Each structure stands twice: as structure tokens, then as C-alpha cells.
Image (spheres, rainbow, N blue to C red):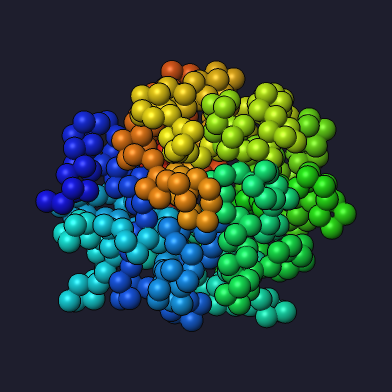
Amino acid sequence: MGSRTTLVEDLMERFPHVPREAVFKEDLLRGGVAFDASALSDNESGEVKPKSYFIFSFDHGTLPELGEAALRRPPEEIILTGGPYDLRRTVVSVRVNPSSPYRVAADEDGVLGLYLDGKRISDVGVPPMPEYYRHTLSNGKSVMEVAPTIQWGYLIYLTVFRVCQYFGAKEECQYCDINHNWRQHKAAGRPYTGVKDVEEVLEALEIIDRYDTAKASTAYTLTGGAITKTVAGRDEADFYGHYAKAIEERFPGRWIGKVVAQALPRDDVQRFKDYGVQIYHPNYEVWDRRLFELYCPGKERYVGRDEWHKRILDSAEIFGARNVIPNFVAGVEMAEPFGFTTVDEAIASTTEGLRFFMSHGITPRFTTWCPEPTTPLGKANPQGAPLEYHIRLLEAYRSTMEDFGLSSPPGYGPPGPGNAVFSVSSFMDSLPAQEPSQV
């Protein structure tokens, strides 16, 4: 067997309490997957829902480096089932890496499978083209461009500001390619709206609401780059908040409203709440003080780590602790040249952060770091963090939640292996299943 297969099976054996599905999922998220031509979509003209590039590239190469996958987009996500490991249904966000040891390809009967070191390890399901993607706005824009859905249709992802005002080496987060992703899509001639008009967003949501007859879409996220000045004359709270206000007025109670923004002062956070936002994601990115200062120079300069954390705690008084869910980028803790050099040190640091927030009733979540090659950390760490780090983080995350008596956060769909739809990390796959009324 190849070395990657041996590594994966060794980790399954060493950490039997972590679902085997999560081990594969984390490896695919951290290292990407290659696609045969037989597994690519026909973009918006086909039967498979294509990758929308909803905010970051989440690829291990630039568009020109992806070959045919840049012309015929891969699926938005894949589902793993069955195979020799008897995998339960596992939804994985697609991160393209032409040199990955994992490959999605069709067999001689046309059935898609995931192959590792040349061996078929699972069946692969791809998301069907949703009916609402087949309809355009009155101005001709696609629903996928304005209001793409991810997490197998659960979440409408509204990146209403496609660039970030933290700009350049002295301000941009060192793992983030939002600004490059904007540039590469524009250079490729793809539609990629910088600031989305609120009426366009509402029209796209009307199309989704009309054709999503199964009500699979349950939540929306408003997000985009940080705003240090103004956009269209609005500060950050008012800019993102006015979309929420319009959505809630037009579609009261239809979706769970979430906003990803900076950790803002209390009065600004109150505005989010007043506008109808239900869940607030003031992402803290990385716990360690030194790494935060190095990796998030703009956030350190404009806000500062201590103030950022204070604002997160303050926001819990407005939204309730359960509805404040800050993200961190799992894996950058071990990025060279500044990160921790051992998994033990990295897990200890990350767990310290988890315990800090969870002791206040706040449940962070995380995105598995994809080392995009146009970012400083991606260039220096093309392999990302060790798979062992990601597996041990899942173990530490669940253990810390249990220590503080917390359950899976709202707005992420069902938890548990075989149930979870959250696609950019395995934290929901690794938590115990709950009754549907709890999610």
C-alpha cells in the first residue's frame, strides 16, 4: 500500500474515537483532490452543481494551473459512501489539487469513485443541479453568482463584498486569498460581482425560495472582506446589516440569518441584532498571541487580539453565548516558519483557546486550512499541517465541548457521522448525533 494509505489507516487505529469518515475528510480538505475529466461538471449547463468559488479559491493551484478543471468546474462538493472502509455519508467541500494522491474518477461502468494510491476507497456522489440554478435574474446574472448554496444546499452563501480592505503584505491575513481570488476570476473573464446589489440578492433569494420546494436551504450567511472605512457609504455593521434587514423584511423567518464580520464594538453588534441577524461569527482565526500578530497583521493593527476577544465576549451578551460562533483556521498553528513545530504544542495552544471561549458558553467552529498557493503561508507550506494535527484537534474539540456541557452550535445542520452537511471541516461529523429539533 502507498504511504498515504498507510498514514490514514495508522491514524484510524491510533484514534478510534474519531470517526473514520472524518479522517478521510480532513485529509481531502487539507491536501485537496484531483479530478479525472470524467468527474468534472458541465458548468451551469449540466446536471451537476458546479463549484461556485463562493469566497476563497480553496484550491491548491491558480486557475491556469488547474488544467481542464479551470474550464469545466469540479462539483461544489462530493459525498463519500461505502467502499472497503464502509464509510457513512460524508459531505466534503471540493479543493482541487491535480497532484493529490486522491482522485475522483469514473469506472468502466461510469460510476464515480474516490481512489487513493490507485485503490478505490469509496463511492462518490455529486450534488445535482438545483432547479433554482437553472433560472437567471432579470439582468441575466446567475443565481450561482449572486447567492450560491453550499453544504449540500443547506446554506446560502452571500459574499456581498468580494474583496477585503485589509490590503497588502502589512494588512492581509497571511493564509487568506480573498483578494487574489477576486483578481483571478476577473482575469479569467468570469462573472464575479465585487459589491452585490441588495435588490439582486433579494431577487436571487426569491428564485431560491420559489424552486427550493423541499426547503433544503435553511440558513444564509452574509459575509465578505473586512471593512476598515466604508463601502457604498456604509460602515461594516451597516453595510452587512442592511442586507439582513432587507432579507428579514422580505422573507421573515424563512432562513436562519448569520453574519461573518469583524469583532465589532458592542453598539455595532447590537445593530446586527436589530437588523434581524440571529447568529454572529466574529472569527478569531488563530489563538496564539504571537501567531495572531504575525498572521493577522491588519486585525492586530486595527483592533488587536485582546480587544478582539473582549468584543467576542461582549457580543454574547447581545446574541446569547450559543449564537456567537467564532471561526478559527485549523492548521495555520503549524505553518512554517513561525508556527509550532510539534503537534503536541499546536494542540495545546488551540485547546487553550477552545477552553477560553467554551468556559464562557461560546462554541467556536473551525475551517480546515487549505494552503492556497498565492498566500504567504500557502507558498511556504504547500502540504499544509500534518494530518495528525487535524485528527487530534477533532478529539480535543469534542472533549472540550463535553467538559463544558456544550452541544453542537445552531445553524450548521445536523451533527454526527453520516448526518453532517458542514463541508469545510469535520467538526460536525465528529460530534454525537442529536434529535432534529436541536439543530
Relative placement, left or right, of 232 versus 96 is right
Residue 128 position, x and y percent, is 42, 69
12 versus 142 height, above or below: above
The image shows residue 40, relative to residue 7, as above or below, that is below
Residue 109 shown left or right of residue 349 in the figure: left
Q: Horizontal and vertical percent for residue 192?
A: 64, 69
In the rendered image, the residue lying farthest to the right is 233
The residue depicted at 64 percent of the width and 47 percent of the height is 169
Left or right, residue 361 beside residue 42: right
**One can see residue 147 in this view:** no
- Residue visible at 74% across and 62% down? 195
382, 93: nearer the viewer: 382
| Residue 65 in sight in this render | yes
Rendered position, 34 above or below 340: below
Q: Position of residue 220 (x, y in %)?
A: 62, 52
Q: On the rendered structure, is 327 left or right of 7? A: right
For the residue pair 325 and 73, the one nearer the viewer reads as: 73
Q: Position of residue 69 (x, y in %)?
A: 41, 72
Query: In the displayed image of the protein, which residue is found farthest to the left?
Result: 1
